[in-house]
Amino acid sequence: MIGLIIGALVIASKGTNPFTAYKALIMGAFGSSYALSETLVTATPLIIISAGLIMVFNMKFWNIGAYGQYIMGAIFSSFFALNSAPTTSPFLLLTMMSIAGIIGGALWALIPALLKLVWEVNEVVTTLLLNYVALFVLKYFMYGPWRDPASHGFPLSKMFSPNAQLPIILNHTRIHFGIVFGIIIVLVIYVIIKKTRFGYENRVIGENNIAANYAGINIFKNTLIAMAVSGGIAGLAGMTQISGVIHMLQLEINPNYGYTAIIVAWLAALNPIAVLVIAILIGGIEAGGYHIQMIMHVPFGIVGVIESSILFALLGGEIFKTYRIDFRRRR
Amino acid sequence: MTEQSSILVTLSASAVRSGTILLFPTLGEIITERSGVINLGIEGMMIIGALFGFITGNLTHSPYIGFLVGMLAGGLTSLIHAFISITLRGNQIVSGLALTIFGLGLTNFFGQDWINKKFTIPVSSIAIPGLSKIPVIGPVLFNQDIFVYFSYILVVFMWFVLFKTRTGIHLRALGENAQAAGAMGVEVNKSRYWWTFFGGLMAGAGGAYLTLVYAPFWLDGITAGRGWIAVALVIFAMWNPLYAVIGAYLFGGIDSVQFQLQASGTTIPSSLLNMQPYLMTFIVVIAATIVLRKRHIGTPRELGIPYSREEK
Amino acid sequence: MTDIVVALRKITKTFPGIKANDGVDFELRKGEIHTLLGENGAGKSTLMNIIDGIYQPDSGEIEINGKKVHIKSPSDAMKNGIGMIHQHFMLVDSLTVLENVLLGLTSAGFYVDKKKVAAKITAISDRYNLGIDPFTKIWQLSVGEQQRVEVIKTLFRGAQILILDEPTAVLAPQEVEETFKIYRQMVQEGKSIIFISHKLNEIMDISDRITVLRKGKAIGTVDKDKTSEKDLAKMMVGREILFRLERGPLNRGEKILQVENVKALNDKGLTALNGITFDIYGGEIFGLAGIAGNGQKILSDVIAGLRKSISGSVYIDGKDLTNANPKEIFEQGLSYVPPDRLKVGLVPNLSSSDNAVLRHYNREPISRNTFINYTEVENYTDHLIKNYDIKVPRKDAPVKFLSGGNMQKLLLAREISEKPKLLVVVHPTRGLDIGAMEFIRTVLLRERDNGVAILLISEDLDEIFMISDRIGVIHDGRILDIVDIEQAKVERIGLLMAGLDEKSTQ
């Protein structure tokens, strides 16, 4: 609510009627089957990345590096897309691309995890800086070895062969197989954190290292595995985006989903199932944001303002939750 | 003067200017963190300062008013973080990230009409009589614009406040042992508000310097991660304003060297050159952390922990 | 009379469930060292916190120099010339001595003339022979030196009345002697000191008068010259042990715990255990009595695998588990109720259910393969809640919202439900109300009757006498003596706790 009000104030300050803008935004998000399908396309990477982030946020490891892990996943998987024989079967090629994407993201995530575990290097700073490094690695490939000679100098790779493209699962839309990955991942992560020893152990690690040691939990091993999973999933999201939506590697592959996914994970109160709903809502705001940018020339930045304001409200509201329980106890 | 050395001087002078963009926010965050609050929203506060400073500068035709408004815009933005993390005791890491997303979104929104516009009023360099005549150091450090001189004064002043005054003792106690500071009569939360606000002012100053003097133009996302480099430099500087100067100029240096190399038409791909400041920061942060650990000094102990009098 | 600098009249202070002070009268004369003596929980600290303005009394009056005053905060107390030195120092480690002194100075301006303040600190330091350099950082100082910094802080602010809350608890014996010299000099110069302690030998050394508190009440005030350590011990403990909880006959089983000549260091790298040797058999409770900080926590951590010993060995049920990891030791049948519930034993922000299974989340039936069956977790939690009468409003709420007694019950229930061979409990009833105390003691006795070997570490002598079969006394990292309960005399145990062997006092 507060987020929407702040958004409205910002829109109004530029002389646009915020109610018209919001109406258009909602129409652009959910108002037609096309709009809805675009919302789901946007929600897909958010679902995937958020689910992975929950894995590590659950143990209070602040992986802010989904942005970079996503890019590395895209780069690794592109290697196979661009270098395999066109006759490779789609199943084999897509499997290889997925695995490559996971490995790319996981490796990129393991660097800050190891630095934290061995030398206690602040993971917020390292994951963030690696995001920029990853962006420039992508830039290197796009202006260097992987640029399509026919692109007239634009930073684009060759179009992926149809065999390297994730299938569209609903005709006449852009909804691709990635959303199936997303749902599977959400369920798997849900099971891991809510139903397994590993999830339980990670919750203990996040809250109390001494108690974790007392209970005989291997902090080093668990952190590495969780970070590899989290980064690997972000890498897979990068793969599904280039293979399912963009169909090539280019400079603009929307890695900002890596940041938006943090908002999604947090708004979902770190519950993977809730991610499905929240990601579609946020995906809707993003898709609607593109829509109003097109038709009303309201800059897309408004989306960031609304999203961050909602997050501020949630963060500020947590104290009231705590107080309520506290109050009950005192009575 | 040989040609090489004159290039070196030009390069160093530009390194100082580039470093100044980082120096302001680093100084601010040092103070904020010393008081026990971690504000990862520097990037957001910087870009808000950058845009609103730029717009004001253009409207008033005064770089100085623009700079002040940019500072203030950064400061006001920081109050969101202060309210959430100090008063409401929300998660400071996530709040800082949200602040960055907020800043990037807001400036994209309001900056649309200003993209690629320039700020055309040059801020001239002032040669300081005497000092600017010193070989090498003179032209590099003492033939700069007024904002650079302002940053010199700030560094010395902040070092002085931090280590020589009672205010500084309070400030340092806040981040180390808020309970003890509170018991000694320091108003913990009120002070933390002030120091967080100060951090915001400084981030805004860095942003405004970027768009009014260094660039001087507006582009969407012009800060390009400099806010995050500043967060890293705080660690490198071991929370000391004097070391912040070294860190900031070092990275200013890397920035101008890679820029010069590109301009000179080297064969090294520009992407790899652009990457250097971030990669170097990454390496330096690791090195600094290892060194700090060995010397048993480091992060203010209660960084990021909210304070409430009832809790023991 | 004007030479009474502090007078407390009928001070009463109640906390939920506990009457910490009950109509306490107390007088401090100018130029005396007046000791408050009492066991843990007798109400000493509460009373002093009232003088220092941290707590407000429910009823009763405070007079300073003959004038009735209301002290609302520590800075109020300071204005009245009262300075308290807490057990936990209010010092900022990374700052220098000078800076810590300045921290509390409200009168100083923005810029501080460090030389001037340093000179004043040095003057105070020299005058009392404190040996403190104003430019040293706090973390570089020993605990004893840090305490002297606290003294400087109070003197710097012009305190005439000093309250010292168990200052010797953290000091080495030779430091205690030096510290006492300082106190004597201060009272000679007209300052007055309230000294809180339960170490009898020190009290006899330093005090002019002694007031004994027991269970919140002032039992009496005596002159040092007209009393003895024995009398004081009796006043403090109060009586022969009056009642014992019902229990079966001692049915000693096999040797379960064998600790041999164990030595270990504390966090500061100083020797905390100096050759500890004892055994515990199945079906008995071994009570380890001692004053706080004599190595109890270190010993329990070494046995539980949370701290490494530097020499000696620990056997549980015949298996060498010296410096094994906590998990291994747990698997071998040790259960542990640590002294610090919320730091080691429980995870404050996780739910009661999650905490209930912390030790056996990976055992059947709670866990199969890699999965945890949360229905079983709930069942298990319900079972604990029911059997141990734990009041848990919501199982899914963070455990930190439970009351202390219920937290402790949950912890104990979790630890003993796995049928341990050996149970180590440290201060199991500290800070609990009487109902919870009795419940926990009854549970311990029941486990004993089931054949479990129990090590009970407690500072509450009543508790030790109430349920132990044998009593050991630890002092300065050594066990001074072990006696059967039938032969144990409260006075002698009290003296041993203070480090005095009977022979040496006679």
Image (cartoon, coloured by chain):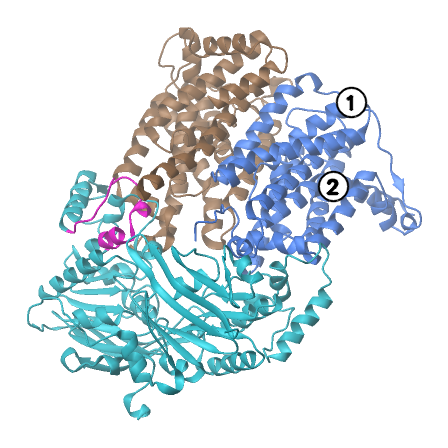
Q: Can the viewer see residue C261?
A: no
| 2 and 1 marks on the same chain | yes
Which image quadrant for residue C8?
Answer: bottom left
Tell me the colour chain C is drawn in: cyan
Q: Position of residue C406 (x, y in %)?
A: 24, 51
Which image quadrant for residue C56?
Answer: bottom left
Residue furthest out toward the front: C1
- C50 left or right of B170? left
Q: Position of residue A173 (x, y in %)?
A: 41, 10
Q: Nearer the viewer, residue C161 or A181?
A: C161
Q: Residue at x 15, y 42 (%)?
A: C379
Q: Nearer the viewer, residue A245 or C378?
A: C378
The answer to whether the residues at label 2 and label 1 have Cβ atoms under 8 Å apart is no
Number of residues whose C-alpha sits closer than 10 Å to that of mark 2, classed few (under 14), some (14–19) or many (20 or more) = many
Residue B77 position (above or below residue B250) = above
Instruction: Point out the stretch of residues depicted in magenta.
Output: C388-411
Q: Position of residue C395 (x, y in %)?
A: 24, 41
Q: Residue at x 61, y 59 (%)?
A: C103
Measured in 3D between alpha carbons, the distance from the residue under mark 2 to the one under mark 1, in whole angstroms, is 21 Å
Q: Earlier in the sequence, mark 2 or mark 1?
A: 2
The dot on residue B58 is: 1
Residue type highlighted by circle 1: Asn
Q: Position of residue C319 (x, y in %)?
A: 19, 70
Q: Residue at x 72, y 30 (%)?
A: B69
Tell me the colour chain B is drawn in: blue
User: Which chain is painted in brown?
Assistant: A
Q: Provide the residue designation for mark 2.
A: B20
